[in-house]
Image (spheres, rainbow, N blue to C red):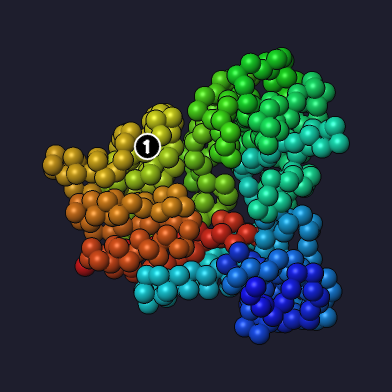
Amino acid sequence: MKNYPVEKNQEIEVEILDLSHEGNGIAKVDGYLLFIENTLPKEKIVAKVLKVGNKFGFAKAIKFLETSPDRQELPNEALLRTGIAPLSHLSYDKQLVFKQQQVENVLTKIAKLNVPVLPPIGMEQPFGYRNKAQIPVQKIHGELTTGFYRKNSHTLVPIEDFYIQDPQIDQAIIKIRNILQRFNVKAYNEEAHEGFLRHIVVRRGHHSGEMMVVLVTRKPKFFKGEEIATVIHDEIPEVVSVIQNINEEKTNVILGEFGRVLYGKETIEDQLLGKTFQISAKSFYQVNTEMTEVLYQKAFEMAALQPDDVVVDAYAGIGTIGISLADKVSEVLGMEVIPEAVNDAKANAKRNGVENVHYFVGKAEKIMPQWLREGIQPTVVFVDPPRKGLDASFIETTAAVSPERIIYISCNPATLARDLALFSEQGYETKQVQPVDLFPQTTHVECVVLLQRQ
């Protein structure tokens, strides 16, 4: 048996020294780390040890002896327990400082880059911003219940005010849940892999107000599905699209392959930087519209776009970046692996009367060399990859195409740092790093980075 300086259920007085990248307070007992949620640096607390592991343990604060001046009133403790808003106990100006430090840490440790990280651009109202919600459903005490899973578990914590979501979406979820309860729709049981309704997904256009509701079900046959969808529209007139998405797998992936329209149209519309975009159920669309506009404007400014530039929009999604900058450049070539997104992108270009933008289905590392052989020479490449960042082969291909400037938009500082180090090996220097806070109250941060060919 190993001897640890603490044991389970022990109560111990500690001082919080720092915050982890997940937003938990860090205390040390004889060099042994304890992670404690809802605590902040310089706070003195009595903690109860919950779990003891080889290298670190977890505890909870049961009494505060000294609190931090940076602490802000918690709207709801469930936001911390579920990980929805793990920084909601920290004042917003200090959240921005925390995020700047996170980006600086990974750039120096992982990428070994000595590049100044600019102070993050924050929101004036840092809550109620999410334009999309994906809410699990469970049966609790015989009732259809919506909320969010407790951290590291699939125990549902009932929540009605999600704080960081558009309040109209929160209200819609309650109404939709109550309609489904009236129709006696059965909630999915994950352990037994039985029952019917898995998730309620709601998207709302920030500027348009249009709503889409996606009901994720375990089976295709939806008894009274169309009738339910019509009632949802009648009770929430902003809902112009109700989709059934079918996910028969035993998985924690939310959306399945196939969907069908139960009411209205297949897409909703929203505006971004004065252009109109159609968004389908599976399309990627940034969840914070207000700050996405700030992010894109910053990215275009960094790119120093010229009228004769040929721009590649890799990971183009529904075309938001390419279409927004098209009137500043000669031509935009976009690619994306999801065919539905490419269809949306093409429709969005047409709808906005943009004729110098062309979209293709496929991976950039296959398509770009082909363009090079055809004599197409991009001057600027925009990349906005998912959290896992870029494939090494993509980085090599992009460097081989040798654009003058690369604009990297990242939602994960760790994979960003790894990729910047690889770009550096290929002769691209990181010139500027600007964090933009698309995810207030959470530990996530978006960055836009300018790379220049040496």
Q: Position of residue 285 (x, y in %)?
A: 51, 42
Question: Which residue occupies the foreground of this view, 102 or 193?
Answer: 193
**Residue at mark 1:** 337
Q: Which amino acid does label 1 sit on?
A: Val
Q: In the image, what residue occupies the spot 49% across and 64% down?
A: 435
Left or right placement of residue 367 versus residue 267 in this view: left
Q: In the image, what residue occupies the spot 43% across and 52% down?
A: 388
Q: Which residue lies furthest to the right in this view?
A: 141
**Location of residue 21 (image quadrant):** bottom right
Question: Which residue occupies the foreground of this view, 176 or 55?
Answer: 55
SS type, badge 1: loop
The quadrant the C terminus occupies is bottom left
Question: Which residue occupies the foreground of this view, 201 or 7?
Answer: 7
Q: In the image, what residue occupies the spot 73% across and 19% down?
A: 228
Q: Residue furthest bottom?
A: 30
Count up the numbered dots: 1
